[in-house]
Image: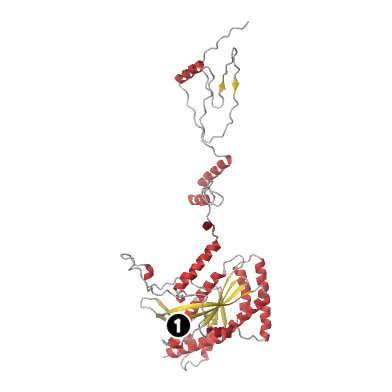
Amino acid sequence: MTPAITPPAITPPTITPPGKTNRRRRDTGTEADEAKEEPLPKKPRSNPRPCPEPSEEKLLGDAGAAIKADKPQDPPELPQDPPLLSEKDSQALQSVFAQVMASSPRAFLQSAASQPSRLQGGNGTTPTQRSTPTQRSTPTQRSTVNNATYRRVTLAKVGISLHDELPDGVKNTIKEVVDANVLEHRRAEIREIAKAFHDACLDNVRTLTGEDDCLRSLRVAIEAFCTKETCYREKARWREELKPVMPQNAFSSGGLVPNRLPARSEKNDDHSPVKTPHPDFSIGIKLRALTSALSSKDIGNNINADDFMLWIQTEMVQRHPDGPQELLLPLSPAELASDLAFPFVVFEGKAYSTGKQIFEAENQAAAALACAHEMLLRLDFLANGKDEKNTQPRILFSFTTQGPICELWVHWTVAMNGRRAFQSKLWDSWNALVLHRAEDFIVKLNNVFIWGMGRFMEEVVGKLAMIAKRTSV
């Protein structure tokens, strides 16, 4: 006999917290067992939302709906919480807040700027960005482009150029200097210097050495050829007034673009765009040796060489109506190296594996020798007056290096189309890692030093003697 079914008492449903809702199931003829859902895993909340208290009306309405339903109701869908920070991000955020409280605003901004954003990739770009080939340029590539523009535009504006054709007669003069015969006893010394230079270059390329280490190897050879009359200075900053300036612009776009303000480039500006030279090594004549050599010349009975040299170093003139006062004849290219007079060769070097390219050294040497030629032009003008027919084209030299790679450049100046041009040409190059090439390089270096302290010095002293006679009263 089937037992009588007693209907359950009607009671309002109990509201349970989210994650713990029970469902009541009915079975035919029997009361369904209550099945409990597994509780949802709790997640840490940085700011949990408060759950509002239900009203009495809402409770009664929910109870009636539960009785009338033939089938059990699905549990109400829980509101979705916003995505939460991970434990790692939460710790990072707390660390940032701690920095704000403990440090100044400026220090905090600097610290935040040094850390990549969570939304950025490892290369500092957002996930939607992609690096293009032009964005991957290295500092060396950017430096190469800047040096090329500096040579092609900046140096060209003031008349400095490289890889020019030698003028007539200059080639033979160069050969007489660099290809001079070396005495046998001197050649034995050169072999020892070349071997030491070769070994030092070999040590440098086997390790990551910088520019100063490579120049130190070259300094040993330079000091071996310096006499008591030779003066050489390292990293001496040359005078800015010796730099060539841009000529007055012969063109104007005023007729093409009317009603505009005059461009800055159309004004006659004495400022030179060339970087002020400060060669690694500047080699010239010692000022005391120049004065001593002048005293042996016939400059007049009433002229004292010491007094004349002191006067010409301090005499100021105004070359342009609105220009500043300048030295009549600067004997030294550098104010802080006053004993260095009339440099005839400069050295510009770069490192091999860790430094810049020799291209930049060539630019620097060309600018420095243009300044040295400017000194000689003033010397010739004061000695010969306005008669430029007696002014012979002069040559000067520079050695540019990049580790064991060495170059010999010849520099001269000519007048072209009413303006002064400073030209140069690569004469020879060597790699000191090859012993016999290192020896040939040292031979050329020796010959340039002998020429500078010989024929070149005699020409300078002769010009100074002519000036002394013209200025005596």
Q: Residue furthest bottom?
A: 301
Left or right: 37 in relation to 310 = right
Residue 227 seen from this side: no
Instruction: Mark 1: give few (<14), some (14-19) or many (20+) Cα within 10 Å.
Output: some
Looking at the image, is 430 positioned above or below residue 100?
below
Residue at position x 38%, y 78% from top? 320
Front one among 375 and 393: 393
- Locate residue 154, reporting x and y percent: 46, 70
Residue at position x 57%, y 39% from top? 86
Identify the residue position indicated by label 1 in the image. Answer: 378
Left or right: 155 in relation to 281 = left
- Locate residue 401, reporting x and y percent: 59, 72
Front one among 50 and 137: 137
- Locate residue 204, reporting x and y percent: 65, 68
- Locate residue 337, reporting x and y percent: 52, 77
Front one among 71 and 119: 71
Residue 201 lies in quadrant: bottom right
Looking at the image, is 97 positioned above or below residue 274?
above
